[in-house]
């Protein structure tokens, strides 16, 4: 038989209400739940040897930066992330993203032979690859160091961490996408070039960035973020399949099957596919050792500018969760 005790129930409710209202705003906005999940969408941009703007010669040793950018090749980046915040100024984020990276010399704005970019324009190389990335990032929230701002809805942050990206560069030839790495176009893996080691399609990177997020209430947020990836390791400058210089094409017959050797001869140099106004080819063949890429002066990189949407997951051990439980009306049996 159930017996209710109104006076006890009312007393417990009043005590719990007063306790909750006196402490709700003493907790940081991050500690309504110590974990966050969300998704990220936005454009991605490749910065490498292929494509870019006019005005920069391939032999220029100055950092090219955004001069490598081809806006027509902007792609969509899609991602998911989870994050945990051990305190108000530090977060650890694990994320996965997918995008497409692409570069094309043919898209360099029209130039003439007096322009520094003429060499890259007539080189006429291109590539495209799917890029699946996983990363681990530290999220530094400067306002989290100042107690009076830990509850602020708008939170800027800095990012630093590491990532790994799976790529497989291909180029379009006679209507078919051809994988570049197996063709050894610059001698990687050949005994004649001991300094050019064979490399993996898994490319490590150092990631840095910045952004801000705005909290709607205590369990939702949205924000903007820019994250740059600097490739590292043996394949760091081969995401686009171009890095060093032209090798002796006779080596293709030594290391490749007849079919692959034919493809390599066609794809390691594509200037002869271009025509002058009179219909003649621009040039027949490059000299062995002639420059093909920037020689590794700048490693391939890419960056994203994304919109983030996320949710703060409730922490059952937090003060707020315990207070919410205490506010439930007790039932006596």
Image (spheres, rainbow, N blue to C red):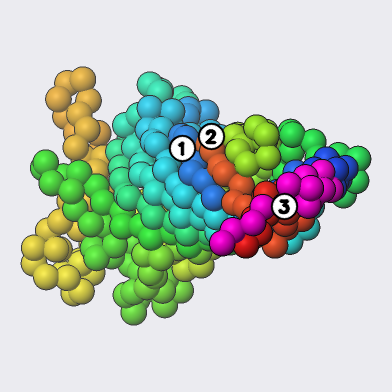
In the image, taking residue 53 as reference, residue 18 lies left or right, namely right
For the residues carrying marks 3 and 2, which lies nearer the camera in this image? 3
Where residue 246 sits, quadrant-wise, is bottom left
Bounds of the magenta segment: 1-16
In the picture of the structure, the residue carrying the numbered disc 1 is 41
Disc 3 crowd, CA 10 A, few/some/many (<14, 14-19, 20+): few
Residue in the image at 20% along x and 74% along y: 255
Residue in the image at 15% along x and 63% along y: 261
Q: Residue furthest left?
A: 258
Report x, y in % for residue 18.
Answer: 85, 43
> Which labelled disc corresponds to residue 5?
3
Q: Label 2: state its secondary structure.
A: strand
Marks 2 and 1: in contact by CB < 8 Å? yes
* Residue closest to the eye, 57 or 179: 179
Report x, y in % for residue 152.
Answer: 79, 36
Residue in the image at 23% along x and 69% along y: 251
* Residue closest to the eye, 298 or 86: 86
Residue in the image at 17% along x and 21% along y: 278
> Which labelled disc corresponds to residue 307?
2
The first of marks 3 and 2 along the sequence is 3
Q: Label 1: state its secondary structure.
A: strand
Disc 1 crowd, CA 10 A, few/some/many (<14, 14-19, 20+): some
Separation of marks 3 and 2 at Cα, in angstroms: 53 Å
Report x, y in % for residue 208.
Answer: 64, 50
The first of marks 1 and 2 along the sequence is 1
2 is within the stretch colored magenta: yes
* Residue closest to the eye, 270 or 176: 176
Separation of marks 1 and 2 at Cα, in angstroms: 5 Å
Location of the N terminus (image quadrant)? bottom right
């Amino acid at each position: 038989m159930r017996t209710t005790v109104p006076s006890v129930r009312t007393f417990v409710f009043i005590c719990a209400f007063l306790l909750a209202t006196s402490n709700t705003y003493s907790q940081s906005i991050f500690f309504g739940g110590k974990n966050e999940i969300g998704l990220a969408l936005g454009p991605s941009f490749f910065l490498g040897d292929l494509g870019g703007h006019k005005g920069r010669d391939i032999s220029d040793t100055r950092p090219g930066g955004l001069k490598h950018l081809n806006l027509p090749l902007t792609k969509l980046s899609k991602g998911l992330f989870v994050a945990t915040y051990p305190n108000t100024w530090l977060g650890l984020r694990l994320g996965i993203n997918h995008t497409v990276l692409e570069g094309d010399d043919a898209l360099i704005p029209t130039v003439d032979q007096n322009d520094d970019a003429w060499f890259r324009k007539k080189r006429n190389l291109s590539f495209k690859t799917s890029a699946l990335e996983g990363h681990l990032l530290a999220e530094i929230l400067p306002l989290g160091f100042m107690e009076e701002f830990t509850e602020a809805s708008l939170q800027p942050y800095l990012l630093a961490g590491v990532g790994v990206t799976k790529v497989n560069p291909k180029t379009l030839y006679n209507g078919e996408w051809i994988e570049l790495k197996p063709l050894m176009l610059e001698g990687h893996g050949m005994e004649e070039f001991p300094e050019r080691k064979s490399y993996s399609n898994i490319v490590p990177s150092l990631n840095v960035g910045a952004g801000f997020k705005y909290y709607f209430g205590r369990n939702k947020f949205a924000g903007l973020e820019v994250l740059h990836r600097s490739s590292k390791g043996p394949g760091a400058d081969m995401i686009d399949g171009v890095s060093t210089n032209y090798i002796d094409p006779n080596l293709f017959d030594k290391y490749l099957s007849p079919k692959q050797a034919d493809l390599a001869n066609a794809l390691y140099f594509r200037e002869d596919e271009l025509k002058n106004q009179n219909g003649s080819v621009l040039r027949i063949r490059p000299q062995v050792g002639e420059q093909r890429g920037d020689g590794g002066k700048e490693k391939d990189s890419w960056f994203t500018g994304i919109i983030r949407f996320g949710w703060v997951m409730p922490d059952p051990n937090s003060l707020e969760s315990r207070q919410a439980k205490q506010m439930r009306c007790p039932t006596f049996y």
